[in-house]
Image: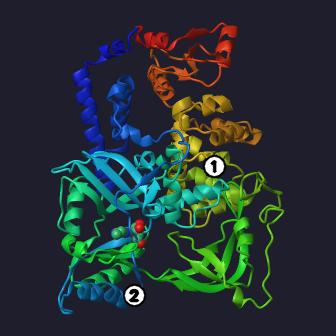
Amino acid sequence: MQLSLLDNADSMPDTENRVKELRRLLEYHNRCYYQFDAPEISDAEYDQLFRELAALEERHPELVTAESPTQRVGGAPAGRFQAVVHRLPMLSLENATNEEEIRVKLDVRIKKELGLAESSSVSYMCEPKMDGLAVELIYEKGTLTVASTRGDGVTGEDVTQNIRTLRGLPLRLTGEGVPALLEVRGEVYLSLEAFQKINRDREENGDPPFANPRNAAAGSLRQLDSRVTARRPLSFYCYAPGLVEGASFSSQHEFLEMAAGWGLPVNPLTRLVDGIAGAVAYYHEMQEVRESLTYEIDGTVVKVDSFQLQRELGEKSRSPLWAIACKFPPRQAETQLEDIILSVGRTGVITPVAQLRPVEISGVTVSRATLHNWDELAAKDIRIGDTVVVERAGDVIPAVVRVVVERRNGTERTVLPPETCPECASAVVRIADEVALRCMGISCPPQLRESIKHFASRGAMDIDGLGDKIVEQLLSLGLVHTVADLYRLTKDDFMRFDRMGDKLASNLLTALEASKTCDLGRYVYALGIRHVGERTAKVLAQAFGSLENLEKATVEELVSIRDIGATVAQSVFTFFNNPDNRAVIGRLSEYGVHPAAVAKTVGGRLSGQNFVFTGTLTLFNRDSARKLVEEQGGNVVGSVSKKTDYVVAGDEAGSKLSKARELGIAVLSEEDFLQLLETP
Ligand code: IVH
């Protein structure tokens, strides 16, 4: 059988054109969404276009190109990062920390250097100083070919695979006059929202949180498994050219304009000013604006706008003479740590929290700070009564940076990790490989409170009106012991609450009723399974189609799902095999909560058939194979059992092949498999 038979379905030139059109559309909508914050189509419509492209590429692997939007999902782990030598060194900047330094270290110095009168006015480009990490992107003939970190300025690391996952970054430049070679430098950063979400997830999972968005961005970009990077919504703003062939710019502002014209993200807050007074005003203005930005900036950068003047000024050892970083003062303050209280989260993680003597840090009064976990508390030797340095580092919750040891007077008290839960007195355990301590009590009040809040939240069952205050009252009146009890509540129950009116009570009941038919992904997320966020829940729902299937899934079946790793698989399996959880799910079902099964392709020619792939596949890879099977209604499972219908064996197939033979299951070669797909 020839592979080209697969082309019968769609004539090649048409397919090729449609593939190109889909790529253009997807890139266009990526830009609308990520760059202009103005999406023109819904997520579902975007997904539909994406799936159409992915399906065509599956059938025509020869049409897949490195810059296709489908390549943004990341790939399997690389051994380690390759070194990339920057053709032009990536310089750093000298710092100024106040108005005076900005004038002296830049304006006065360059005028002397250029022989300009002190009264003359130089044009400066002012830019926010993004607090992320510097990368260099290389576009050859408009296509992104290499991306590297700054490293030591001379040699960086090849992070091309990871950079491709940034949805807001063009893999191909568009517009007029795209140069033959464009090296462009810029900053990869994480929004504050994304940073906070990553840290919340990490804390819940017992991983140490990132100290600030910069570390989180660096940690996310330097992932050997680019599928992890793909799940972190990193962004990029470009700020400088490297080596360029086939285009020229006379100034920084012209460069930024052209870069934006080619589709590269440029920070809209950049501004051309005349004279250093304008740059100083910009610095003060940005200090105000900083508080309302959705990402962290740690200062501004002022650059001589003219490239001719930049060349004349040149650079000294590691930084150019024509630019300066104007740093903002750190958002830190000293205060006294009055107490260390213990907070119990939804999954039972017990976190130490610092109660502080209230102190103002850049306009915000701070009275609590996270101490993250017990290891950190011990490492920093933080004690009750200590004077501590507190920092607002991009997080809503400030952090204790360090202790001012000189201020100790001997009355400070060390706090040891608890042996029992402060809320329910159950035993506390420390799970291997985790920094977190967990309360194992199944009816621990704060865990119950947080899990009900989570269950009712927007991305989960979306029970409108079931806010924090209602949850508190439900618990204090003893009306709810598990999430299932929510569906037993009557109007009379609600009417017992403070400030509860007839209308509000009816609305709550309607919202609860409506949630009974939510989709399976939301329901799985709502259950609060460890390591299962909204996205993973959707993946599970899609893969298993129904709650019954998911409940029965083995660890092997779970790990065979694309994007599900061993930790998630184990956690899902453990959750559904816990009798308490099963009881809650059973009760939910008794009360009429029936999540809508996700329509798996039914009626396809492989409907209900189970496939196992084994050995080295040469005609297609496992992901493609899975999609081909699923498109036609079949399932791909990880292990051979009596329920397996076909085993597709590539080269050097081992134990799974023997088992298939033992059980008398049909064994197909790759060619046979493709033939099967074609059979009407
Ligand atoms: S220009 C030779 N512009 O700050 C010029 N840098 O302290 C090189 N940064 O390594 C840098 N925002 O990571 C420039 N608008 C901006 C920037 C910026 C952030 C970072 C960059 C650089 C560091 C220098």
Residue 10 visible in rendering: yes
Q: Is mark 2 within 8 Å of ligand 1?
A: no
Other-residue count near label 1 (Cα within 10 Å), few / some / many at <14 / 14–19 / ≥20? many
Q: Position of residue 508 (x, y in %)?
A: 54, 53
Crowdedness of circle 2 by 10 Å Cα count: few (<14), some, many (20+)?
some
The image shows residue 478, relative to residue 603, as above or below, that is: below
The residue shown at (81%, 66%) is 418
Q: Along the horizontal axis of the image, is 112 left or right of 332?
A: left
Is 244 displayed left or right of 389 in the figure? left
Instruction: Indicate the amino acid at tag 2.
Output: Asn
Q: Which residue is mark 2?
A: 98
Element class at badge 1:
helix
Please indicate whether residue 163 sits to the left or right of residue 349 in the image. Answer: left
Q: How far apart are labels 2 and 1 at the CA level? A: 57 Å
For the N terminus, the quadrant is top left
Residue 161 in the image, given as x and y percentages of width and height: 44, 45
The residue under the point 69% across, 14% down is 659
What label sits on residue 486 in the rendered view? 1
Q: Nearer the viewer, residue 20 or 309?
A: 309
Image quarter for ligand 1 equals bottom left
